[in-house]
Image (spheres, grey):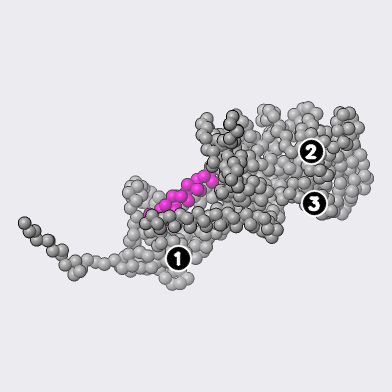
Amino acid sequence: MTERRRFLRTALLASAGAVLAGCDQISQSRTGAAVLGSAEGLTRRVQQVVSPAHLLAPEYTEADISPEFRPNGTTMPTTVDYQNLLANKFADYRLRVDGLVQRPSQFSIAQLQALATRTQITRHDCVEGWSAIGKWQGTPLAAVLSQVGVAAQARYVVFHCFDEMEADTPYYESLDIIEAHHPQTLLAYSLNGQPLPVANGAPLRLRVERQLGYKQAKYISRIELVSSFTQIGGGNGGYWEDNGYEWYAGI
Amino acid sequence: MTTAKPQPASSAFTLAPRAIAHHVLRHRWPIRVMHWINLIALTVMLGSGLQIFNASPSLHWGNWSDPQHQWLALDAYQAADGSAHGTTQIGRHRFDTTGVLGVSNVDGQPQARGFPAWSTIPGPQWLAMGRRWHFFFGWIFVINGLCYLGYSLASRHLQRDLLPDRGELRGIGGSIRDHLRLRHPDGAAALRYNVLQKLAYLIVIFVFGGGIVLMGLLMSPRMDALLAPVLELVGGRQSARSIHFIIAVGFVAFALVHVLMVLLSGPANQLRGMITGYYEVHLKHKPPAPPRSDVSATGQESAHD
């Protein structure tokens, strides 16, 4: 009986181990990863129908703000360009907007503020699982886009950033045109009533409130409108997307 | 002294009414297929869920990750002698769980990680891939669950086999006593779920199954634009994450009891029932004729899914 029990136990552990090893094999294989990743398209389409484009992310009150807004990823970009701007407290900062636009332009922070402003207290959800609540002030991206005039063939808005995640691998992110025009999609320059701290993305960062934290590009240097992002970076639409994360970060 | 050995009664000739083994169709094929798909989906969801949990191995109440409202955490620290220790904090209590939770071996080296590599999918720390597994099998779990719900309503499996009637609910005390004495019916009663079984299945299907999907969706920032009032009702996004985890623990507890019950009540027969559909019962008479709506495709006896 004990012999049989030992056999059953061994068989059970061995088969559990084989299943887990099999899962790892699938994870490593290109086909396996692609098949598993195919759920992203389904999730995106279903969520876009069930939770329509115009709905707003929940907004909170001053009392809900977390005492510390935890920074993640880069907290101090080391590139020369960024360090020069920082040395001058970003007085020389200009946001470049180009690509598939009618009027390629540059904006200082003051010019952005003159376009339009919006303040929102929203929740930031990191892909790791934690959340923080902060009060953001910024210029709706829609106002900037209407200022430069989006060309008809533009499908994505790409955010190029000052910070490098690895040598010569700058951070970047992208949104589709609809998400870019959402009223809560901001180019934020203020957090909790203060100028945006360096750790949180000074002088300008993205807020896109219905997606996870890695979409909220910090240290934005340039915005480019494109018809496809396959030629940019690793071709997946963002730094973390090039590292296996979903382009659609609504879940 | 000699004692006469009492002669046994001529048992060979006793004519006790013999129960005859019948093979009865107990689970119809859609239920069997969906049961095993569900097992695979839940296993992958658990392993990949623990992988995702490990990226931020603590749980909180409220909307944001408030350290004041942290009720569970798997942490690691280095002792003065340089050795790595894993701890598990539940409420105000902290336990040393080195080797399993907080710190466990990866390729023979102690590593700071919430749940150990043998319990996560994939094994190594790999959040992006854990998410792919979780959301792919999440769809399988949801689609399978909806098929189950549709089938159970259409075939009246839910109404007939799972919803207890008032008499059964009154008899719940007896059912509890039977379970505590590990007494399992084997005659005609084995063909029906008992009241505790019915309640357990209903809770697992609707409270656990529905609840864990809802809590998962409440963690989605896109869905929160739609479900904000529900999110507030459960207390916020970190509360949803906590409840999602607690229900997952509930699923594991259910699976353990479920397997234990199978082992105690004749595992071969039970497994055959869920694989081939046929379950052996000992009846003195032929099993009752199936109600008209209930004839299975094979024309066999009443299916009890």
B42 vs B163, left or right, is right
Q: Chain of mark 1?
A: B
Q: Amino acid at mark 3?
A: Gly
Specify whether residue A104 is painted magenta: no
Give the magenta range.
B247-265
**Residue for badge 3:** A234
Nearer-the-camera pick, A108 or A63: A108
**Residue for badge 2:** A218
Whole-angstrom CA distance, mark 1 to mark 2, is 58 Å
Q: Chain of mark 3?
A: A
- Nearest-to-viewer mark from 1 and 2: 2
User: Which label was assigned to residue A42?
Assistant: none
**Residue for badge 1:** B277
* Residue at 48% over, 57% down: A11
* Residue at 58% over, 39% down: B103
* Residue at 50% over, 48% down: B252
Query: Is disc 3 surrounded by few (<14), some (14 to 19) or many (20+) residues within 10 Å?
Result: some
Dot placed on the residue nearer the N-terminal end, 3 or 2: 2
Marks 1 and 2 on same chain: no
Q: Position of residue A133 (x, y in %)?
A: 69, 33
The answer to whether B274 is drawn above or below residue B240 in the figure is below
Whole-angstrom CA distance, mark 3 to mark 1, is 51 Å
Q: Amino acid at mark 2?
A: Lys
